[in-house]
Image (cartoon, rainbow, N blue to C red):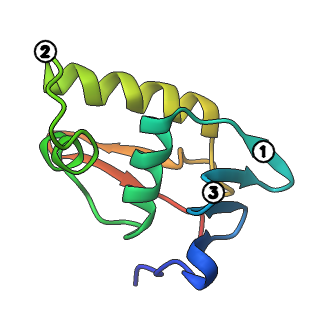
Amino acid sequence: MDEQPDRGDAVFKFERIRIDLNSRQVHIDANLIVLRRKEFDILSFLAEHPGWVYTKEQIYLSIWRDERPVNVDNAVTCQMKQLRKKLGNNPKGTPYIETVWGVGYKFNHGM
């Protein structure tokens, strides 16, 4: 069963990762992970429903809203690549942001 994040004080808390929606800060253990605006928005969007798979189109429509990059696929892919690089792996050794081939992406919190 997928665990829902603890939303107290607009903070998602998982085993090692803490996502503060108000301060827009992410910590893994005691380390601050510096994210750009879109990276943070994507992470918080995915972390709201850990384990749920979202298509690139769903992510794009939720994050970019009215902005129109030239290539939706490339815009999402580039942001995901940078986000995964910054976050690394969860305690299970799998990436926090996992690609579900042929479908999209999901957040793995490590539980």
The quarter of the displayed image where residue 69 is located: top left
How far from the left and from the top, in percent, is residue 15? 69, 69
Is mark 3 in CB contact (under 8 Å) with mark 1? Answer: no
The residue type indicated by label 3 comes to Lys
- Density class for disc 1 (Cα within 10 Å; few <14, some 14-19, many ≥20) is few
Q: How many labels does the image show?
A: 3
**What's the residue type where badge 2 is placed?**
Val
Residue 36 in the image: state x and y as whole percent.
Answer: 54, 32
Compared to 1, does 36 lie above or below?
above
Q: Name the residue under label 2.
A: 70
Evaluate if marks 2 and 3 touch, with contact meaning CB atoms under 8 Å apart: no
At 19% from the left and 31% from the top, the residue drawn is 67
Indicate which disc, 3 or 1, sits on the residue closer to the N terminus: 1
Could you tell whether 30 is left or right of 44 in the image? right
In the image, residue 21 lies at what x, y percent?
A: 56, 62
User: Which of the marked residues, 2 or 3, is nearer the chain's N terminus?
Assistant: 2
